Image (tube, rainbow, N blue to C red):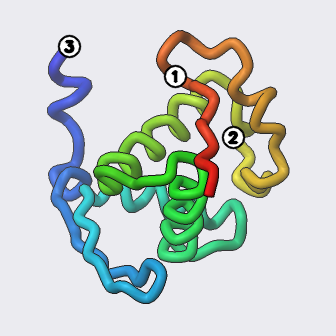
Amino acid sequence: MCEVFISADPQSYDSRTRSVRLHGVVTSIRLENLFWQVLEEIGRRDGLSVVQLIEKLYDELVEARGEVGNFASFLRVSALRYEALLARGRIPADTAVPIRTLDAQAVLHALPQGWARTPRRVSS
């Protein structure tokens, strides 16, 4: 069993820090290289740089939840969800298909418990 996991290229789990500007505030985000690669793929699908994707995710998370919490963990989970949704055929493997064109409700319909919940909207 372990060979499946321990055969990973050590560079994939080396971490890298990137600085991003979120609403005028410069912050650093440290993720493993494999997560950065997945986020880059997600961004490319919609014509976004990884920094633009991160800014968009941050803004939408704040709008949906009213707070961010552990943003680096959110990014890791987002990358894992993307890969899991690809594996389940919920997101097309063709990276020419932008994520923004997908029907989110159809992608999330009937997922296993704990995979999706309706985001709460925070009133101003």
Q: Which residue is mark 2?
A: 93
Up the image or down, 51 lies above or below 30; here it is: below
Q: Earlier in the sequence, mark 1 or mark 2?
A: 2
Q: Is residue 34 visible?
A: no
Q: Amino acid at mark 3?
A: Met
- Residue closest to the eye, 118 or 123: 123
Residue 102 pos. (x, y %): 81, 43
Marks 1 and 3, how far apart at CA: 25 Å
Q: Residue at x 48, y 75 (%)?
A: 51
Question: Which residue is located at x 63 percent, y 43 percent?
Answer: 121
Between residues 19 and 80, which one lies in front from this camera angle?
A: 19
User: Residue 62, image x and y in percent?
Assistant: 52, 57
Image label count: 3
Q: Which quadrant of the figure contains the N terminus?
A: top left
In the figure, 53 relative to 104: above or below? below
* 76 relative position to 53: left or right: left
Res 118 seen here? yes
Residues packed near mark 1 inside 10 Å, few (<14), some (14 to 19) or many (20 plus) = few
- Report the residue marked by disc 1: 115
Q: How far is disc 3 from disc 2 in space, using C-alphas?
A: 26 Å
Q: Are marks 1 and 3 in contact (CB under 8 Å)?
A: no
Question: For this rendering, which residue is in front, 38 or 116?
Answer: 116
Per the model, the C-alpha gap separating discs 1 and 2 is 20 Å
Q: As drawn, is 124 to the left or to the right of 104? A: left
Q: Earlier in the sequence, mark 1 or mark 3?
A: 3
The quadrant in which residue 24 appears is bottom left
Circle 3 residue: 1
Q: Residue at x 70, y 36 (%)?
A: 91
Q: Secondary structure at mark 3?
A: loop
Instruction: Give the x, y percent position of residue 70.
Output: 29, 51
